[in-house]
Amino acid sequence: MTSADAVLKPDHASQRKHFIFTDEHDQLRESIRNFAKKELAPHAEEWEETTFPDWVFPRMGELGFLGLDKPVEYGGQGGDYYSSLVLAEEIVHAQSGGLAMGLAVQTDMAMPPILAFGTEEQKQQWVVPAIAGTKILCLGITEPDAGSDVAGIKTRAVKDRDEYVINGSKTYITNGHRADVIVLVTKTDPDAGYDGFTLFLVPMDAPGVIREKKLQKLGMHASDTALLAFQDVRVPESAVLGQVGKGFYHIMWELQGERLIGAAGSVAGAQRAFEQTLQYAKERTAFGRPIGHFQVIRHKFAEMATKLETARQMNYMTAWRFQNGEYPVREISMAKLYASRIACEVADECIQIHGGAGYMREYGVERVWRDLRLNRIGAGTDEVMLDVIGKSYGL
């Protein structure tokens, strides 16, 4: 007969990590968290008003954080895909969604297509300094009349002897006011359908590139978001990124990695709000006891924790498949859809648990909600994700 002491007891505080992470990932996690708390978080309130300063890029480049999963030959750390997930999860401790967004554009949106499709010269010119943080990148897809409908892009690039002349506009461009170069999606053959798009690397100081205005947003205040115009911008043939006519496919590939990173950031941001709210529920009293001791509040935390854990496990398993050479578009779309929705639900519930305090800026949960809301729109809206998933079943 087994004694009661010998029976395995539940360990609710277990810190055992997911199997995709190693001790090296844990050390990286600690380094990024310490950096974010000590060097970034103290400025979070100020940067909400001013946007975060450019020095963040070279500082993070110096620490090796801008090339965690990038090749060593270009100055990266040569790590696996999971190391970029660690960055997405730990940068939330900077307490600035806008800062996390600006960095993600650099590391997981604009840089991957240059690495995947760029020439050696393009990689040396842009990837090496981007990993060092001395050059800032942005990505130009969305236009005033073309958001989810990427095929509706009107920005044209017309061949003129050994150059291309670009005309058009882009909007909602993160890093658009500070970037040194833009990965620009253009239409080179308006009659070729999906085979009529081409990517260009356009220096932002090229004649005809106009940074029109800094856009005002609901959240992500710490990042700069630009409306850009391109008026007879001339670039050489060497500015083409990848193959002429294959830009649509190049950018669709890029979006998959971006979506998975976005999903990780969504869960991490909501987790931070959850933990902050849990502490509040243990300290705030009503009717003579801490509010966390009321069943209605306790059940809210149980629901939130379950949803967060479900999203997290989905992210990790999908990342494992991605790291191991698969291209699971359906599951990436599911992870992005579910994580961004759950993050918004959790942030909203955290405001509710805080009551009136949750609506006040000083507690910070309202900012988490405002910052997280973008994840249901950017890198593919909920509606686009649902359509991708539905079509994957032959519907």
Image (cartoon, rainbow, N blue to C red):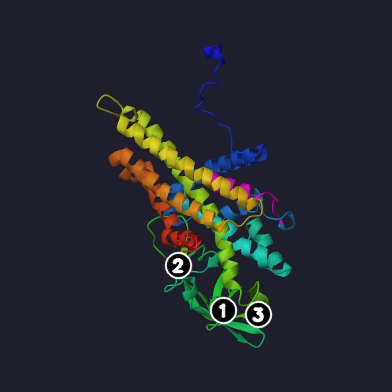
The label shown at residue 196 is: 1
Q: Is residue 249 above or below residue 188?
A: above
Distance from the alpha carbon under mark 3 to that under mark 2: 29 Å
- Neighbourhood count class around disc 3 (C-alpha, 10 Å): few under 14, some 14–19, many 20 upward: some
> Looking at the figure, which quarter contains the N terminus?
top right
Q: Secondary structure at mark 3?
A: strand
Secondary structure mostly seen in magenta is helix
Magenta region, residue range: 75-91
Q: Secondary structure at mark 2?
A: loop
- Neighbourhood count class around disc 2 (C-alpha, 10 Å): few under 14, some 14–19, many 20 upward: some
Residue 38 x/y as whole percent: 54, 41
The residue indicated by pointer 3 is 236
- N-terminal of the pair, mark 3 or mark 2, is 2
The residue positioned farthest toward the bottom in the image shown? 161
**For the residue marked with disc 2, what is the amino acid?**
Ser
Residue 103 x/y as whole percent: 55, 55
- Neighbourhood count class around disc 1 (C-alpha, 10 Å): few under 14, some 14–19, many 20 upward: some
Q: Nearer the viewer, mark 3 or mark 2?
A: 2
* 197 drawn magenta: no
- N-terminal of the pair, mark 1 or mark 3, is 1
Query: Going by the image, does 37 lie left or right of 371?
Result: right
**For the residue marked with disc 1, what is the amino acid?**
Gly
Distance from the alpha carbon under mark 1 to that under mark 3: 19 Å
The residue under the point 56% across, 82% down is 189
The residue indicated by pointer 2 is 148
Residue 358 x/y as whole percent: 33, 42
**For the residue marked with disc 3, what is the amino acid?**
Pro
Query: Going by the image, does 384 lie left or right of 358?
Result: right
The label shown at residue 5 is: none
Query: Going by the image, does 376 lie left or right of 166?
Result: left
